[in-house]
Amino acid sequence: MTKKKLSHLNDKNQPEMVTVSEKEPTFRTATAQTTLLVPKEIFKLIDSGEILTKKGAVFSTAIIAGTMAVKKTSDLIPLCHPLPIEGCQIRITTQAGEKIVIECSVQAFHKTGVEMEALTGASIAALTVYDMCKAVSHDIQIVRTQLMEKRGGKNDYQRKP
C-alpha cells in the first residue's frame, strides 16, 4: 500500500508550491458550505427581511465579501496558485434551528482545482455575517465549513449526506 504524501512538502519536508506546468487545463468546479448558528433575536431580524446596518444589507454584503475573497485566495493562503476565476455564486439561506447556510460555488478552466477558493469564499461570507450582526449579539457560532463537492482534475468528490 502506497503511503499518501502531503502535496505541499518537498523531499526535505520543506514547503513548496505544487508544480502544475505539465498538467493539462480542465474545467474545474467546487462547492463549499459554511453553517452559522445565530441567536433567536438575530434570526428573527433576518427572517423578517434582510437586516440593514450602517455597512449595508447583511446578506448582500456577505455575498460581495465572499466573492472578493474567492478572487484573493492565493494572496491569503500560502502556496495556493492564483487562478483565473470564471464564475462564483454565493447563496445564503436560513434553516430551522436558527441556522444560516452559506454555499459558495466556483468555476475555472485551469490546471489546478478551485476547492480552496470555494472554502475561502464561504468562510469570509460567514465572517462578514458575524461582523455585521455582532452589534445585536456576539453569541454567533460558525460551526462548520466543508467541501461539498469538486469536479475536474484527477478525482471528483461529493460529500455523502
Image: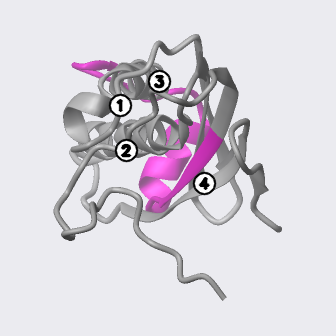
Rendering colour mode: one colour
Q: Are marks 1 and 4 in contact (CB under 8 Å)?
A: no
Q: Nearer the viewer, mark 3 or mark 1?
A: 1
Q: What is the spatial separation of the Cα atoms under label 3 and label 4, in whole angstroms? A: 18 Å
Mark sitting earlier along the chain (2/4): 2
Task: Specify the label residue 18 is tagged with.
Answer: 2
Q: Are marks 2 and 1 in contact (CB under 8 Å)?
A: yes
Q: Which residue is located at x 35 percent, y 31 percent?
A: 81
As drawn, which residue projects farthest toward the bottom? 1
Type of amino acid at the residue the image marks with label 2? Val
Badge 1: few (under 14), some or many (20 or more) residues near its Cα, within 10 Å? some
Mark sitting earlier along the chain (3/2): 2
Q: Nearer the viewer, mark 3 or mark 2?
A: 2
54 over 134 or under it: above or below: above
Q: Nearer the viewer, mark 2 or mark 1?
A: 2
Residue wearing tag 4:
147
Q: What is the spatial separation of the Cα atoms under label 3 and label 1, in whole angstroms? A: 23 Å
Q: Which residue is located at x 28 percent, y 56 percent?
A: 137
- Measured from the top left, where is residue 158 in percent x and y? 78, 56
Mark sitting earlier along the chain (3/1): 3
Type of amino acid at the residue the image marks with label 3? Ile
Q: Is residue 125 left or right of residue 160?
A: left
Q: What is the spatial separation of the Cα atoms under label 2 and label 1, in whole angstroms? A: 8 Å
Residue wearing tag 1:
81
State which quarter of the image contains the C terminus.
bottom right
- Residue range of the region highlighted in magenta in the rendering: 31-58
Q: What is the spatial separation of the Cα atoms under label 3 and label 2, in whole angstroms? A: 30 Å
